[in-house]
Each structure stands twice: as structure tokens, then as C-alpha cells.
Amino acid sequence: YETANSNVHRSMNPLGEKATKMYEGARKTVAQFIGAKNSEEIIFTKNATESLNLIAKTLGKKILKKGDTIVLAITEHHSNVVPWLELKKEIGIDLLYILLDENGNFDMEAAKKHLSEKNVKILSIAHASNALGTILPIEEIIKVAKINKVIVIVDVAQSVAHIPIDVQRLGCDFLVFSGHKMYGPTGIGVVWGRKKILESMPLFLGGGDMILEVTQDDFIAKELPWKFEAGTPHIAGAIGLAAAVEYLQSIGFEKIQKIEKELTEYLYKKLSSLEILEIYGPKTDKNHLPLYAFNVKGVHAHDVADLLGNAGICIRAGHHCTMPLHRFLGIPASARASLAFYNTKEEIDIFVKALIEIHKKFK
């Protein structure tokens, strides 16, 4: 805003050229961050929600017909459920959900069964649960999907700040995430897709900057990635996202994962020692992000969050945009505590002590 405050791809002046260079430079930074072959495969959106909607409303409408099936996990965020439910209403597709087993783990046997069914066309799944913190065996899941010639969409919004992502190694067809969950700005998200598939997809939005030519009767759209970026983009958001990528890379995932592993183990040890808590998901600190969903027995999650907030401890409470999961668990809401590499064991101790005091207050 101070040194390159201009629109991109339009202004033929030094400010505009500088802004365009920074914006497209951000695209290259993001491409390298996730192992994309080229920056044309990176599409900037508002968030992971818009990214998933973009795929559902373009690819979904193009390839799906009545009777086709989408496979999801019961742990999915609403942004990976509602767009497919819309297509269910519009086209008549079916949705199959992979449930959790009796220990709260992702049911791999159920996944294999569902993905081998005749009419399955797309698997759309999160790398890690935003509500439970469970990390799914995503590479194994994708291999099963590919054996059955199923298109794979992976949502890494919850994992991208904690686990290094490489789309080539994963072998998925699409990948989505948001900037705000990796220390970047709000209002910026990403779709990565295989070039051949992206080129075959119809437009998501129409308007400025995504066209080569418009007549009274027709138009010609631009090539990738601009065909999917109609209107003035979130320029500062994209540049801020690139800065967040560079910030993570400056620390290094090896260091981040080492710190977060210790914090996750410590948090789980402390929470699991409290009989006043009900913890949801697998009872383990392995294959787990540094976050846990729980309830204080006899206290509503909203009250827990409110009282913790008054003590300067910020958590989230509610259904975490995962109402199907919460219905599956048989609860209306849960509290969710999340950590990052900048948190400390001392802060965990303060948090746990506060939970004990809250339980005493409602006893």
C-alpha cells in the first residue's frame, strides 16, 4: 500500500508494473512452497471455502451426473460438504461418508470399500481434521483412490502450517488452503490443480481481467491461471501470503515440527490426566496436530470458552463448522484448544489450571 499501490495486469505505469511483479512473484513463491510444477497451476481465491466451491461448481458440474458418488470423511469442514450437497440437490449425485472407528480413528477399511464402489468419481478430503486435530494417512488414502481412478481433492488448510506439503509426492489432483491458518492475511486462499484438468474446467466467475476479448455475442477467456481470477484480486493478500510462506521457511519445518511435537505430547499428557474432561477423537498424541477437542464435564463448551477468554486464554467453542461430525459424536458442541510453535509448556499449565477452576465453579 505504501510503495506499489496499484491494480495488477492493467496499469501501464511503474506502480502498476511493480504491483504486478509482486503479485505474480507471490504466485511463484506459493507454487514452490507446495511443490507445484509451475505457477500457472496456482489460483488465488478468498479462502479455502471459495477454493472448494470453485472446484465443485466447475469440475463438479462438468463431470458429474445423476447417480455419481462423492466420497467425504465425516470429519470434513462444512466448506467441503455444502458445495457437494448443493450438487446433490441440483444433479442428483450421492455422498458417501467415511466414518471413524470405535477408537475415533479414520476408518481405512471403510475408505477402501467406499472408494472401490462403481460410481465414485471424486474423493474430497482434509489432510487433518480442523475439529479433532487428527492427521489422516493421506498418501495411503490417495493411492487407494488412484487405483480406482478417482479424482482426489485435498484440503490442507489445517495442516499447511504444521506439515511440509508436496503435491507431487501426494499424487492428488487438487489442493486447497487458506492464508490465515498459516500466519498470513485473511481473505486469501489457494487452489492448486493439475494443469490439464484446470484447462478443461469451465469458468467460475466472469468479469474483468479474466478475458482476452468480449463481443456482444461471445467472449474468449484468458489462459491459466487468470481465467479463474475475475475482477480486482486481493493483491495485498497474495503478497502477504508469500511473506507468510517465507516466514515459515525461515524457521523451517524441521524446527516447527520438533517444537510442536513436544507441545502436543505435553498438552495431551495434561488433558488426558484430568478426569473432568471428555476428549474427542483418537486418545493419542501420535499423528496429531497440536490441537484437541474436549468438553469439561457438566459445563457447556461456550461457558468454558467465555470463562477462559476472561482469563486471557483464547480457545474456540461450538461445532467448528463440523456439524455432521458433532452429530456423529453425539454432542452439540465442543471446546478446542490449539497450539503453535510459539506457545510454551508454561502456557499449557496455566490453561489446564484454569480448566480445573472452571469445573470447580460449576460443580
Image (cartoon, rainbow, N blue to C red):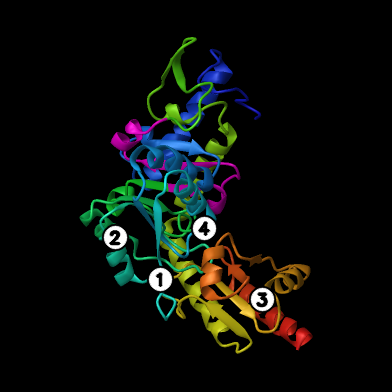
Q: Is residue 244 above or below residue 255?
A: above
> Circle 4 sits on which residue?
77
| Residue 243 x %, y % | 52, 42
Residue closer to the observer: 193 or 204: 204
Quadrant placement of the N terminus:
top right
229 in relation to 354, above or below = above
Secondary structure found at label 1: loop
- Tell me, for residue 287, which label it has, or none: 1
For badge 1, the amino acid type reads Asn
Residue under the image location 62 percent in, 26 percent down: 3
How much space separates mark 2 and mark 1, taking CA atoms? 23 Å
Residue 178 falls inside the magenta stretch: yes
Query: Which segment did they paint magenta?
Result: 176-202
Query: Tag 4: residue type?
Result: His
Task: Specify the label residue 314 is tagged with.
Answer: none
The disc placed on residue 351 is: 3
Q: Nearer the viewer, mark 2 or mark 4?
A: 2
